Image (cartoon, helix red, strand yellow):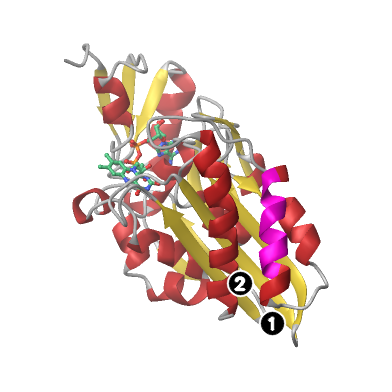
Amino acid sequence: MIPEIEYHRFSRLEDALRFLSENPDSKIIAGGTDLLVQLRARKINVKKLVDIYNIGELRYISEDSGEVKIGALTTIEELKNSKIVEKYVQPLHIASRSFATWQVRNIATIGGNLCNASPAADTAPPLIVAGARLRLKSIRRERIVPIEEFFRGPGQTILNPDEVLVEVNIPKHSGQWFFNFMKLGRRVSHILSIVNVAVAVKLDGGRIEDVKIALGSVAPTPIRAKSVEEYLKNREATLENIEKSSLEVVKDIKPISDVRASAEYRIEMSKVMVKRCLREALKL
Ligand SMILES: Cc1cc2nc3c(=O)[nH]c(=O)nc-3n(C[C@H](O)[C@H](O)[C@H](O)COP(=O)(O)OP(=O)(O)OC[C@H]3O[C@@H](n4cnc5c(N)ncnc54)[C@H](O)[C@@H]3O)c2cc1C
């Protein structure tokens, strides 16, 4: 049984922002697929709910010459069905295909996935390797932050109580980039990740000119695998180099044991997943 909570629903962003600024004890609800589970389990205590799900101005996917813009209330199913996301943000598109079930994808939002700040959030590693920036808005001001600065710990972000994540901005990449995303769960799909990995590799001929690798569910926040990246930069894109680089990931991760897997298993699987994800991206 959920304790009694004041419920306020808005259809205009400005009204929701004003209410949040005057009621700092409020909690935002979007699709509710994380929040309602937490409320039912009494993991959080909420006095006032601010339902933003009907704010249509936050639901869109658009592109201009430089970037893709995704409104925070865009559902995971909409990401999956988007030709723009498929073309320009491939790891996010792959992640949306293995995300939860059809029913959950249809209501769960990209903003909720990020703001819930689960270390296992499947949209986070793809957006990290894509160099995404997040637009945060309150009635007083607006700021744009790199996604890597957004997460503070499990369930914690830099968001102030009166701020809403309104948009995700993703730069378009030029040159010979290769992308991928992989997720390991206790089943192939419809399950939270034990380890998830996204990669973005830029080749100059056979040489790795630039590379970004991000993992989820192996540290308090989604993280970059900077040791692996350092190893790979300016080396040839060979199977041997990828195999050796994947061993470096142990320097970047700090997994815990939980209901889904032990820390030891996560460490071993992180090496395997980094290797597989890179191999598949580069077709090696
Ligand atoms: C059966 C099931 C399967 C799932 N499978 C997966 C999976 O495969 N991969 C995965 O990553 N997750 C999974 N999830 C978790 C969940 O569905 C996602 O995290 C989802 O994207 C959350 O979005 P939401 O709109 O439902 O967020 P909500 O539950 O409404 O909100 C989540 C949190 O974010 C805050 N919030 C929401 N939107 C904003 C905003 N715009 N600005 C500021 N704060 C905001 C809320 O206050 C709350 O703290 C699953 C959940 C269920 C129940």
Q: Is residue 210 left or right of residue 196?
A: right
Q: Which mark is residue 175?
A: 1
* Residue at 27% from the left image edge and 51% from the top image edge: 190
* Residue at 63% from the left image edge and 35% from the top image edge: 254
- Image quarter hosting the N terminus: top left
Q: Amino acid at mark 2?
A: Lys
- Residue pointed to by mark 2: 172
Mark 2 closeness class: few <14, some 14–19, many ≥20 residues within 10 Å? some
110 w.r.t. 246: above or below: above
Q: Is residue 152 left or right of residue 260?
A: right
Of 18 and 118, nearer the camera is: 118
The CA span between labels 2 and 1 is 10 Å
Magenta stretch: residue 98 in it? no
Q: Amino acid at mark 1?
A: Gly
**Element type at marker 1?**
loop
Quadrant location of residue 169?
bottom right
Give, as a single range, the part of the protein colored magenta: 242-250
- So how many labels did they put on this image? 2
Mark 1 closeness class: few <14, some 14–19, many ≥20 residues within 10 Å? few
Can residue 170 be seen here? The reply is no
Q: Main secondary structure of the magenta part?
A: helix
Q: Quadrant of ligand 1?
A: top left
